[in-house]
Amino acid sequence: MHLADVPIDRSARLVVLAGDRAFRRRLMELGLLPGAEVRVVRRAALGGVLELEVRCCRISLRTSEAVRLEVELV
Amino acid sequence: MTGERTKAASCHGGAGATTAQVEIALRVPVVAVAGNPNTGKTTLFNRLTGNRAKVANYPGITVERLEGRAFLPGVATSVRCVDVPGQYSLSARSREEQIALDCVLGLAGEPRPDVVLVVVDGTQLGRNLYLLLQVIELDVPVVVAVNMTDELERDGRVLDAARMERDLGVPVVPVSALAGTGVEVLRQRLADVIAEPARGRPGWRWIPTDTGFLARVDRVAADVPEAWHGGSDRARRALALWALLSIGEDDELEGVPEALRRTSLRAYAEAEEDGEDLDETVIRGRFSWIDARIDDFVREPGRRRVSVTDRIDRVLLHPLLGFVLFLGLMTIVFQSLFSWSDPAIGLVEDAFGHLGAFLEASLPAGFLRDLLVEGIVAGVGGVLVFLPQIALLFLFIALMEGTGYMARVAFLMDRVMRAVGLHGRAFVPMLSGFACAIPAVMATRTMERRRDRLLTMMVVPLMTCSARLPVYVLMIAALYPPGSGGRFRQGLLMAGMYLFSTVTALVAAFVLGRTVLRGPKVPLILEMPPYRMPRVSAVLRTMWDRSAVFVREAGTVILVCTIGRWFLLSFPRETKLPTELEQRVAALETERAQGSSDETLLEERAARLDAEVESARLKQSYAGRLGHAIEPVIAPLGFDWEIGIGLIGAFAAREVFVSTMAVVYGLDEDQDAESDTLRERIRAQERPDGRPVFTPLVCFSLMVFFALACQCMSTIAVVKRETGTWRWPLFLFGYMSVLAWVASFVVFQGGRLLGFE
């Protein structure tokens, strides 16, 4: 299951973090390592952007890039 | 205050301290202030430096930073405080991200810090400690300030600074930059570490044990240059990690030795072949250390602050309501730039108008008076006239950034702006561009990436700024003589010009983003900080700093251009007037001397004649000659050499076109676009063969030209200031001029082919 498919307000565990190196490194440095828990907070109007909660912090990703994050619901 | 502190220090000092003070006095100690974005780093910086910090540039790059002096107890001289760019990590891919490492280590022209102050947000320690661990690994003396302690307290969360100090091995000071608490203790701890650096250098916290991993790191460490690690083995290894995580096939780092680059890439690739992801190993190593301790550092029985932010975001980021509120806010921003700034702009214009008139009346006529009045006073006025709009726009930007709303702008607008390759946050400068390109170009600094800023700067000047309006008004009036009943069509045409400029700017962004400014697609990773109340003083400071930077750095270019324009329009001074005109002047003089006819009638004739003399002078000035010179170039667009003079005058600012044309056509220069005299004169102008100059097609062609041409030296000056090079302003001028010429050519020649006039 991709992160983009996680329903709002549900938590998921990151299983695989794909994408190019810089993208992966930046997410990992924000604490989004494989195994970390992530909650989908909301989606922007027009559905382009996704707000997430990781380590008590909020970050936003584009939906098109969130499909590179494979997760499982917890 | 300063004197007291120094005195107190020398009293308590004693003999031992005196030698230390002498040594320190030889070199001003440097404090580098680092931290994640949104940690209140700037507020704390201003606290330490007593709000005396100045905006400066990092050497050789156009990223701005604060720099100031702070006084520390027991340190004889003031210490130099420098700002490290706010980042989540020291690892870098671009030159701009690399500056953080340069600042911490004192590389690439940066001063070597005596102590690095790492500011962390106490409410988000879990993420903030990552950067701190990186800095500690580099073996530079570190002091930690845990900020936002007031928020922790309010949420009923307890910070255990003693525990943090024990585990981290560096001085840890709880502060609230907002309230100013803990700052004096922080000064003391900074002074302690400056005097005894070992106190802030505890060595690595996270100790890797995997021998295979360590072997790889040490192989890379062997190629870390001495100038970077300064003889420290800890720093050498830390820099090996930095190299492993930062150096890639497509990085844009500078000053990395070839050997280090090669070994690092090889080590990374070898690990990859063995199925190990070095990035993950390192990042996980640090986070595991943090995770094992974070619950001891902050104990949190209370509720989270996030819930307040959540409630606000439920409204502000609501799919529909959030959008409406954003557009409402943008309407206010636009209104303020477009109309609320008017009284202040009028005040500046009037003040300099009066000053000019006063000088003109009180100084003897001559070169110096004209230079002073028409060059310098007009030029300084021309710079200061932008300040109301700059200050207003940055009032809104400071509020949006200070509260945390700016991060939400990208969240809301990304989908829309991305369609043409622009950053979501580019919406604010683009909209501001409808009022004036100058503050709009300055507003691009809210975007982190240089490429995003450049792309926005290159298209913002295409938006219909208010300086174009007088030209459009005049041309539309020329198209529709009074009584022709074209009111509705006039309005439609004006709206059409706005639409035209918006579409052109978006298309230009689309094209430039895929050609000249093509870059790797960068994923959007956006922090959404909690909402906070900004400090009034911080907001005022932003407004002041931006205004000061504009006056200091763009002002000079604008002033020089104004003087240059005055020179072109007023020289050579001794021109020979046409014989017929001279005869009329002489005749008037004689009549005056005789005092025969009606006084008022005589004065009216004199004023008209004066205007004609001015017109004749202007036509023979360098600008006039230039107008003739460029006529072959602009003739295909339907413009004659007299319009050419107007175009040259308009380079100062587009609206100057109106007053320049008034002088060219023998009216006094006080005419504005609403003036019926000027409108009639424009309609009445004829070419040598008797055809009217301003046919509808010429009017259209001229409007298109003004919509697209970069007829604004202030824009060029401010783009030069923001990009730090002449390359981009020249490119902007070049592409807009070519675009304007081609579009006007198509309108005029195409229109003629279709049988229009």
Image (cartoon, rainbow, N blue to C red):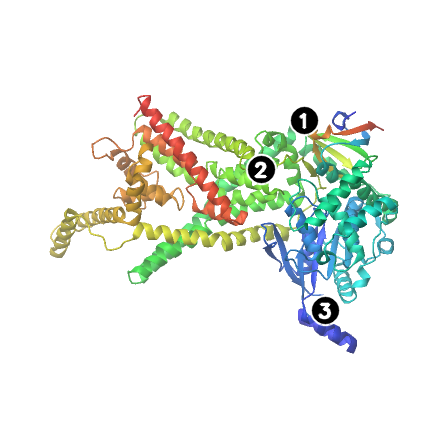
Q: Which residue is mark 1?
A: A47
Q: Residue furthest bottom?
A: B15
Q: Amino acid at mark 2?
A: Ala
Same subunit under labels 1 and 2?
Answer: no
Same subunit under labels 2 and 3?
Answer: yes
Q: Amino acid at mark 1?
A: Gly
**Nearer-N-terminus badge (2/3):** 3
Vertical placement of B389 versus B434: above or below? below
Residue B297 x %, y %: 85, 49
- Mark 2 residue crowding within 10 angstroms, few (<14) / some (14–19) / many (20+): many
Asked whether the beta carbons under mark 2 and mark 3 sit within 8 Å of each other, the answer is: no
Viewer can see residue B57: yes
Residue B184 x %, y %: 75, 62
Q: Which residue is mark 2?
A: B426
Same subunit under labels 1 and 3?
Answer: no
Query: How far, Cα to Cα, is label 1 from label 3?
Result: 56 Å
Quadrant position of the C terminus of chain B in the picture: top left
Asked whether the beta carbons under mark 1 and mark 3 sit within 8 Å of each other, the answer is: no
Depth check: give the residue in front, B326 or B703: B703
Residue name at image x 80 percent, y 57 percent: B233
Residue name at image x 40 percent, y 32 percent: B742
Instruction: From the viewer's perspective, tell me whether residue B40 is left or right of residue B324.
Output: right
Q: Residue furthest top?
A: B754
Q: Which residue is mark 3?
A: B75
Kindly state the secondary structure of the residue where label 2 is placed. Answer: helix
Kindly state the secondary structure of the residue where label 3 is placed. Answer: loop
